[in-house]
């Protein structure tokens, strides 16, 4: 179903639902230091959604587990409401891991969303696990000048509210945009993104989840993938 064919009443209903769920997101310090850190990436094409989950042991950042889930998409494409379309396959990917992770990095926005409920919040709320939104681009908000050094940060602001942080993970490289998903503070979210980033722009769990999703999506398109 294209956006043009989606009833306005449905869009309004889900936006209201999103705002209501945003009030349930909890920003609170972590209760323990994560030892198993997972990341989720997703690929949606036509009527199929593919979600990858990769879990790494910390501090070694060695691969502990991975899983891929594939589902038929049932929710229409509506900008700003994409978590209702993408969250189910992300949840299935995490559910297929052998061990429940202590922290999950999600490819997308958390609080840095027009209604403060991006996919990282959605997934975090459903899982009851601390989650961080690690986005490659800005959905909403603006920020000032960011230093070129690794670890440089500057607040991402929307309507006079700090909704996330632009974070330079490598010198001179385009920043990532970090925001709270659930059960973590923004300062901790930034800290864990930097602690799990080594040689690349993305945190290592996110990079590997993205690579796995790309690989399986290519196999799926070619008809080579066997679940």
Image (tube, rainbow, N blue to C red):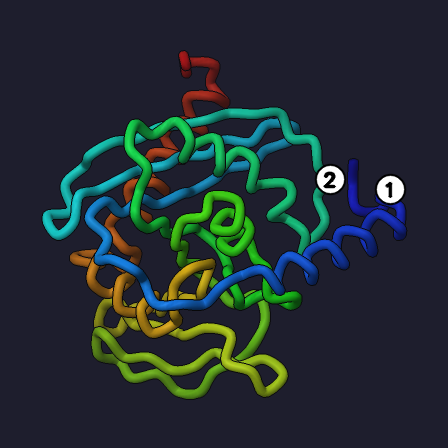
Q: Relative to 61, does residue 64 appear above or below in the rendering?
A: above
Q: Is residue 132 above or below residue 153?
A: above
Q: Residue at x 78, y 40 (%)?
A: 2
Q: Position of residue 83 (x, y in %)?
A: 60, 48
Number of marks in the rendered image: 2
Q: Quadrant of residue 199?
A: bottom left
Numbered circle sitting on residue 76: 2
Screen quadrant of the N terminus = top right
- Which disc is residue 192 wearing? none
Q: Report how far apart the C-alphas of labels 2 and 1 lie in the structure.
A: 9 Å
- Give how far across and how far down residue 150 sits, in percent: 21, 74
User: Residue at 71% across / 37% down in the picture?
Assistant: 75
Residue 88 in view, yes or no: yes
Would residue 167 be found to the left or right of residue 42 on screen? left
Specify whether residue 177 is in view: no
* Camera-nearest residue between 211 and 30: 30
- Label 2: element kind: loop
Badge 1 element: helix
Quadrant of res 217: top left
Disc on the earlier residue, 2 or 1: 1
Q: Are marks 2 and 1 in contact (CB under 8 Å)?
A: yes
Instruction: Determine which of the numbered discs, if any, sits on residue 5 in the image.
Output: 1
Question: Dot 1: within a 10 Å radius of its alpha carbon, few (fewer than 14), some, or many (20 or more) residues?
Answer: few
Q: What is the residue that sits farthest to the left in this orientation?
A: 60
């Amino acid at each position: 179903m294209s956006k043009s064919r989606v009833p306005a009443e449905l869009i309004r209903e889900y936006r209201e639902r999103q705002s209501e769920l945003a009030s349930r997101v909890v920003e609170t310090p972590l209760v323990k230091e994560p030892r198993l850190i997972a990341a989720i990436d997703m690929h949606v094409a036509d009527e199929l959604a593919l979600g990858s989950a990769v879990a790494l042991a910390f501090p070694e950042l060695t691969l502990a587990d991975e899983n891929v889930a594939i589902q038929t998409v049932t929710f229409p494409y509506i900008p700003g409401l994409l978590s209702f379309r993408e969250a189910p396959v992300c949840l299935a990917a995490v559910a297929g891991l052998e061990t429940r992770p202590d922290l999950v990095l999600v490819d997308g926005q958390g609080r840095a969303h027009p209604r403060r409920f991006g996919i990282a919040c959605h997934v975090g709320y459903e899982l009851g696990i601390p989650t961080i939104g690690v986005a490659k681009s800005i959905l909403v908000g603006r920020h000032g000048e960011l230093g070129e050094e690794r670890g440089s940060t500057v607040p991402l602001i929307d309507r006079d509210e700090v909704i996330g942080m632009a974070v330079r993970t490598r010198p001179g490289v385009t920043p990532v945009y970090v925001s709270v998903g659930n059960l973590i503070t923004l300062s901790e979210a930034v800290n864990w993104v930097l602690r799990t980033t080594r040689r690349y722009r993305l945190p290592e769990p996110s990079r590997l989840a993205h690579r796995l999703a790309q690989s399986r999506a290519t196999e799926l398109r070619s008809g080579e993938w066997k679940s």
